[in-house]
Image: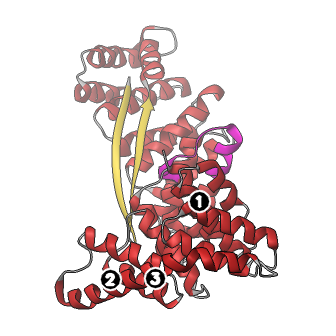
C-alpha cells in the first residue's frame, strides 16, 4: 500500500509563475504486516503478542483507530525486549500513516532509527520515508536533514535531489536552492535523463530572488530551448536588450520580438521610427502595416500620428525599391562589402529575401565588414523568410560566443529551430 499526498506551491517570480509539485509516496505495508505477523511467532512474548494479534486483525479490517489503540496497549507493557519494541513501533507507524498522522509516523520512525531498530537494508528506505513525511509537514529543515542522509548512499536519486532543492527554496535559502538544483540538473545530464521544466523553473526562481541577471538569462535560454512558451520569451525580452545596441541592432532585436508575436503599440512605433532614421523604409512600412492590420496601431489618441508615419513610410519605401537595383550595381564596384551589406538590409526590409541573401553573401566575400556579426544574423533572418531553416541556423551559429550579439544570435537560432 502507498499513501500518496500531492502538494502544489505557487511561487511568483516577477512575471514568472512557477508551479512545483511535491509528492510523498510512503511504502509501509510489507514491513508493517511482517511486524504484525510477528505477533503470532516466537519473536514476541504471549503477553505482548495478544494485543498485537488483535491489532493485526483490526488492521486487516482497516479499523485504524482501534488498531492503533491495541498497539499502544502493547507499547504500555513493561519489560519488553528490543525486538518487541521494534515490532510495536513498526505497527504504530503503519497505523499512524493510514490515519494521516504524518507527524506521529515521522517521530516513530525517527525513534526507531535512533534505536537501530531497522535492518541495515531497510535504513535507506526509512530515511527516504522520513524525509518525505517532513516535506508533507512543511518541516523543511528536517526534510533536508534526512534527504541528505539518504543521498549519501543514493547519490543519483533525482526526485530526492529535487526535494532538497525545493526545501531550501521554501526556507528562503535561495543560494543553497540554486546550488542544489544545479547539482540535480548536472546529475540528470550525466545519467542521460531529460532536464525537467519544473527544475529549470525552480532554478530560475532561486536566481531571480538573488537578482543574478546573467544566470537568469542562461536559465531562460535553457527553458526556451527545451520548453518554449510565450511567457519565457516575454521574460527573456526583458533581459536580452543591450544598452550598447546600435539602432540597426535594436531593429534586429525588435524583429525577433515581432516574430514571437510579442510586440505592442510602442514597439511598433519605435521600430518604424528607427527604420526611417537608418534609411530602411522597407522595414518601417512592413512593421507599420502589420501593426495596423493587427489593431495595434491606428486607434486611440495616437491614431493621426501613426497614420502620417505610415504614409511617410510607404512613400519612402516606394522610392527606395525603385533605386535599389542601380544602387546595388554601384555597391558592387566598391572596394569593401559595406555598401552591399546596406543594400542587403534594404532588401530584407522589403521582404526580398533572395536579393538580401545575395547582397549579404557578396558583401561578406568582399570583406572589410565592420559589422560581420550583424550581417550573419540578418542573413539568417533572410533564410528564415525563404523557409530555409538549416541555412538560417548555420548563419546564426557563425556568430562567436564573444560577440555582444551572441545572445541575440542564439535566440534567433532557437526561434529558427522551432519553425515547423
> Is 194 contained in the magenta span?
yes
- Front residue of this view, candidates 330 and 12: 330
The residues colored magenta run 183-199
Which residue is at 68% across, 38% downward?
A: 191
Between 83 and 187, which is closer to the camera in this rendering? 187
Q: Which residue is mark 1?
A: 354
Tell me where residue 272 appears, x and y as whole percent.
Answer: 41, 83
Crowding near the residue tagged with mark 1, few <14, some 14–19, many ≥20 C-alpha atoms within 10 Å: some
Image position of 294 with respect to 242: above or below: above
Residue 319 shows up from this direction: yes
Q: Quadrant of the N terminus?
A: top left
Asked whether residue 167 appears in the rendered view, the answer is no
Q: Secondary structure at mark 2?
A: helix
- Seen at 32% across and 28% down, the residue is 73
**Residue indicated by mark 2:** 310
- Element carrying mark 1: helix
**Residue at the top extreme of this rendering:** 41
Give the residue at mark 3: 319
The answer to whether 19 appears left or right of 174 in the picture is: left
Please provide percent x and percent y for residue 247.
55, 86
- Residue 43 on image: x %, y %: 52, 14
Disc nearer the start of the sequence (1/2): 2
Gap in Å between the C-alphas at discs 3 and 2? 14 Å
Between marks 3 and 2 in the image, the one whose residue lies nearer the viewer? 3
Amino acid at each position: 500500500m502507498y499513501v500518496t499526498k500531492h502538494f502544489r506551491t505557487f511561487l511568483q517570480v516577477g512575471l514568472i509563475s512557477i508551479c512545483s509539485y511535491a509528492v510523498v509516496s510512503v511504502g509501509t505495508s510489507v514491513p508493517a504486516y511482517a511486524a504484525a505477523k510477528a505477533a503470532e511467532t516466537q519473536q514476541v512474548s504471549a503477553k505482548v503478542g495478544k494485543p498485537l494479534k488483535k491489532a493485526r486483525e483490526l488492521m486487516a479490517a482497516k479499523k485504524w483507530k482501534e488498531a492503533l489503540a491495541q498497539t499502544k496497549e502493547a507499547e504500555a507493557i513493561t519489560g519488553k525486549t528490543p525486538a518487541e519494541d521494534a515490532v510495536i513501533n513498526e505497527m504504530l507507524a503503519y497505523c499512524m500513516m493510514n490515519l494521516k498522522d504524518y507527524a506521529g509516523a515521522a517521530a516513530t520512525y525517527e525513534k526507531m532509527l535512533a534505536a537501530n531498530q531497522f535492518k541495515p537494508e531497510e535504513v535507506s528506505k526509512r530515511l527516504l520515508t522520513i524525509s518525505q513525511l517532513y516535506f508533507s509537514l512543511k518541516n523543511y529543515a528536517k526534510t533536508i536533514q534526512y534527504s541528505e542522509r539518504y543521498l549519501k548512499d543514493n547519490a543519483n536519486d533525482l526526485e530526492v535531489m529535487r526535494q532538497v532543492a525545493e526545501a531550501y527554496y521554501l526556507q528562503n535559502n535561495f543560494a543553497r536552492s540554486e546550488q542544489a538544483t544545479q547539482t540535480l540538473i548536472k546529475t540528470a545530464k550525466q545519467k542521460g535523463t531529460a532536464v525537467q521544466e519544473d527544475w529549470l523553473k525552480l532554478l530560475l526562481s532561486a536566481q531571480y530572488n538573488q537578482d543574478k541577471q546573467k544566470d537568469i538569462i542562461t536559465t531562460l535560454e535553457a527553458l526556451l530551448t527545451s520548453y518554449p512558451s510565450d511567457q519565457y520569451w516575454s521574460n527573456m525580452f526583458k533581459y536580452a536588450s543591450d544598452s550598447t545596441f546600435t539602432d540597426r541592432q535594436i531593429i534586429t532585436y525588435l524583429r525577433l520580438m515581432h516574430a514571437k508575436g510579442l510586440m505592442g503599440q510602442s514597439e511598433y512605433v519605435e521600430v518604424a521610427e528607427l527604420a526611417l532614421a537608418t534609411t530602411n523604409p522597407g522595414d518601417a512600412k512592413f512593421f507599420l502595416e502589420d501593426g495596423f492590420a493587427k489593431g495595434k496601431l491606428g486607434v486611440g489618441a495616437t491614431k493621426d500620428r501613426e497614420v502620417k508615419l505610415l504614409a511617410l513610410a510607404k512613400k519612402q519605401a516606394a522610392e527606395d525599391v525603385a533605386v535599389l537595383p542601380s544602387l546595388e550595381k554601384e555597391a558592387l564596384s566598391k572596394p569593401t562589402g559595406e555598401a552591399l551589406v546596406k543594400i542587403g538590409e534594404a532588401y530584407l526590409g522589403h521582404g526580398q529575401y533572395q536579393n538580401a541573401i545575395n547582397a549579404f553573401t557578396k558583401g561578406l566575400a568582399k570583406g572589410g565588414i565592420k559589422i560581420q556579426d550583424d550581417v550573419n544574423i540578418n542573413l539568417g533572418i533572410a533564410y528564415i523568410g525563404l523557409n530555409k531553416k538549416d541555412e538560417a541556423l548555420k548563419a546564426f551559429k557563425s556568430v562567436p560566443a564573444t560577440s555582444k550579439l551572441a545572445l541575440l544570435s542564439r535566440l534567433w537560432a532557437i526561434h529558427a529551430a522551432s519553425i515547423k
